[in-house]
Image (cartoon, grey):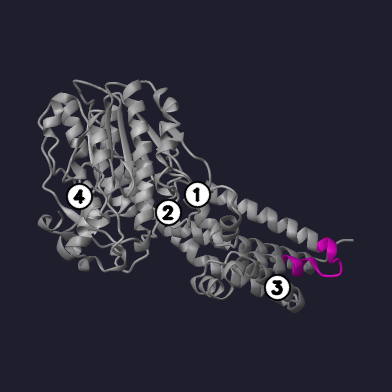
Amino acid sequence: MRLRTDDRSHLLRALAAAIVLSTVPLLDFYAANMAELTSPSRVLRYAAATLAVAAIVATSLALLLRRIALWRILLATGLMVFVFFAYDVDLIHRELQSHLGEWAPAAWIAAAIGTGVLALSLLRKPAVVTICLVVSLAFSAPSLARIATILTREHHAQALTATGSEPAARFRISPNIYWIVLDGYPRLDVLKDEFAFDNSDFIRSLATVDFVVLGKSRSNFPATVNSISSTLNSDYTVTGEGDALKPFPIEQMEALVRGKSRTVSRLASAGYTYVHFENGYDYLTECAPDVPKCVRGNLGLDELDIAILSNTPIIDLVLRYQQQAPFAWGGVSDLTSKLEAIRSTPSPFFLYAHVLAPHPPIRFTATCGFRAADPDLQRWTPSARPAFIDQLRCTNSQALTLLQKIVRDDASALIILQSDHGTAFRGQFGKPPTDWSDADLHERFGALDAMRLPRQCRAAAADDLTLVDTFPLVFSCLADSTFERHSPRFFVTPYDDTADFGRAVEYPSERVR
């Protein structure tokens, strides 16, 4: 039997509406996060999987409900998937959790199915096909516009960060360089002041493998992307002054983090191979597509998986019925397990390894056993301070094992063990940047900074260096040249989910202890 032209038209429009309704949540996700994503490939894979599941559902319904027009089944399926992905809408999720607790995921799955049943009952007139298609396209229009805007900004950012051809750097020595960032690791005195925890044993253990620990080191920024990009670029990633002060566009900072920085360019000109380690921290520190060598650690669920699945009841079901900790990524042991792959790189190489620990979520015990973890990277809950210290103890033991192994196998290695910033248990990011107290600044800016430098360079590692001086110090050491440090500056840069995003507030250096 051949379809009439108008039937075929209804079917095609219903199919288009179903595809848009099924994928618009992922389009929204990509539009909101594309600045942090190296490419759309993983989101596209989720979209393909979603469409495959929707196709199976629609086919099954068509076989079971042969008397119902296929266009009605397609629309009902698209609406079911759309509702399924709306689980993380704040009001919906809060009310479901408040009233139904652990039954919330099942209730929302039932609501999605109920939406499909209701659609099959009510959508009977072919005219609704056009209405549904128009409405679904209207839902997708803002995200498409945002994507177009960001693509334009990215093109501009790439022009700004293009490193070009650097003149060949001349170094007196060329050891392998390991830059290991432990996210959110506080300085010794901050741990004592804020947590009543004495971390002296770990600091002393670093001395046994020839590290110099900078006891007054400070981050220059309180957020990862700002801190890492400024460290890699050996300069402050801000423009303007006073009320016009603002951070670099996030696309520009992302490019710096992913290898398009002065540090990587200068080392490459001296014959170094850049090695980027990713271990499920987040899509910010994924390997760039053109990175010379990418080494991947734990390949379990990472922040991108969590962020997408959190839009559905799946995430709560995973948390409830997990047999192992699915979010136990981001441990130092992930890096240790990949040292052989890293060391297979011809010398000299420069490794950038960003490890999430000890940053929340709190997923490790003091002995590195796994905890059931809520996969929220912003959950600096004051009551979790003791658990954070447990996670830090685990980080200490794994870090010492890692460092001992590196030194044993690569005796001349230049190793930098740093944090990008401190903790935020005082609720700093719930306050306007101008309202941070001295104690807020002390907790967030007091960062671990330990360096294993050639002996002739150690005197230049002043106790109060800030992170922006890391690679100027390294380069002066390698080239046997004079080290000129920056005048220390400190900026609070609000996150992108706050009203103050896009601003930078500078605090006088005397306030940042």
Calculate the distance from the C-alpha at mark 4 to the C-alpha at mark 2: 23 Å
Residue sitting at x 32%, y 41%: 181
Instruction: Determine the image quadrant of residue 61.
Output: bottom right
Q: Could you tell me if the residues under marks 4 and 2 are in contact, i.e. CB atoms within 8 Å?
A: no
Calculate the distance from the C-alpha at mark 1 to the C-alpha at mark 2: 9 Å
Stretch of the chain drawn in magenta: 62-74
Amino acid type, label 3: Gly
Q: How many marks?
A: 4
Q: Earlier in the sequence, mark 3 or mark 4?
A: 3
Q: Could you tell me if the residues under marks 1 and 2 are in contact, i.e. CB atoms within 8 Å?
A: yes
Residue 143 sits above or below residue 371 on the image: below
Q: Is residue 478 at all visible to an observer of this figure?
A: yes
Q: Residues within 10 Å of mark 2 (few under 14, many from 20)?
A: many
Task: Determine which residue is flagged by label 3.
Answer: 114
Task: Determine which residue is flagged by label 4.
Answer: 189
Task: Determine which residue is flagged by label 2.
Answer: 361
Q: Is residue 464 left or right of residue 206?
A: left
Calculate the distance from the C-alpha at mark 3 to the C-alpha at mark 4: 56 Å
Q: Nearer the viewer, residue 437 or 295?
A: 437
